[in-house]
Amino acid sequence: MAFGQQSGPPASAKQMKYLLSLVHEAGHDGFRDARHPLGLTQRQAGGKFTTREASELIDRLVAGEFATVDDEPPPSGPRPDRPPRAVDLRSDLAAERAQQRLDDQRAELIAGVPADDLAVELERRGWTCTPPVEPAPRTRRGPGKPGTPTRGSAS
């Protein structure tokens, strides 16, 4: 692999759009402006991310690991090179949709994890897990003998 080349498939356009909206939410004009505060490489500051790098940065930004520009102390003087950022409602809507898709993907992923493995991981993190209570067999009500088990249950 040559110097400066990315090691993996490039991030998708949707992933990059969502990432850029999060960078804007953090108060930066773009990847170049966010290079040092977010610890990006020169390649990443140019907008080139692998799928894995973009996913990790998205997770860190969503988790609020980085201080926003508003959290930083004000500069000693006015910055004429950087006008105040206007709120773009379209990017906010796009960010909400991207977050919803991300939440749906995570829910789908967690649904595929076997319950025993999930319980072991939760217990490892300090949670307590109790298996569900088996429901009693259903009985048919109405005409017929009371207490007769329904079709498909044990007799």
Image: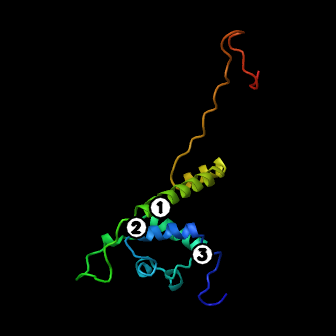
Tell me the tag on residue 25.
Answer: 2
Q: Which amino acid type is shown beneath numbered disc 3?
A: Thr
Tell me which label, 2 or 3, sits earlier in the chain.
2
As drawn, which residue projects farthest toward the bottom? Answer: 3
> Is label 2 in contact with label 3 (beta carbons under 8 Å)?
no
Q: Is residue 28 above or below residue 87?
A: below
Label 2 Cα crowd, 10 Å radius (few <14 / some 14-19 / many 20+): some
User: Compared to 19, does 96 lie above or below?
Assistant: above
Q: In the rendered image, which residue does mark 1 sit on?
A: 95
Q: Nearer the viewer, residue 6 or 82?
A: 82
Q: For this rendering, which residue is in front, 118 or 65?
A: 65
Q: Position of residue 122 (x, y in %)?
A: 55, 52
Is there a contact, CB below 8 Å, between mark 1 and mark 2?
A: yes
Q: Is residue 98 left or right of residue 86?
A: right
Lateral position of residue 31 relative to residue 78, left or right = right
Classify mark 1: helix, strand or loop. helix
Give the structural element (helix, strand or loop) at label 3.
loop
- Location of the C terminus by quadrant is top right
Question: Mark 2 or 3, which is nearer the eye?
Answer: 2
Q: Which residue is mark 3?
A: 50
Mark toward the start of the polypeptide (1 vs 2): 2
Report the residue at 46% width, 67% height from top: 21
Q: Quadrant of residue 69?
A: bottom left
Residue 13 appears left or right of 67: right
What kind of residue is marked 1?
Answer: Ala
Query: Mark 3 or 1, which is nearer the eye?
Result: 1
Element type where label 2 sits in the image? helix
Nearest the eye: 142 or 48: 48
- Where residue 150 sits: x, y (%)? 72, 21
First reached walking from the N terminus: tag 3 or tag 1: 3
Q: How far is mark 1 from mark 2, CA to CA?
A: 9 Å
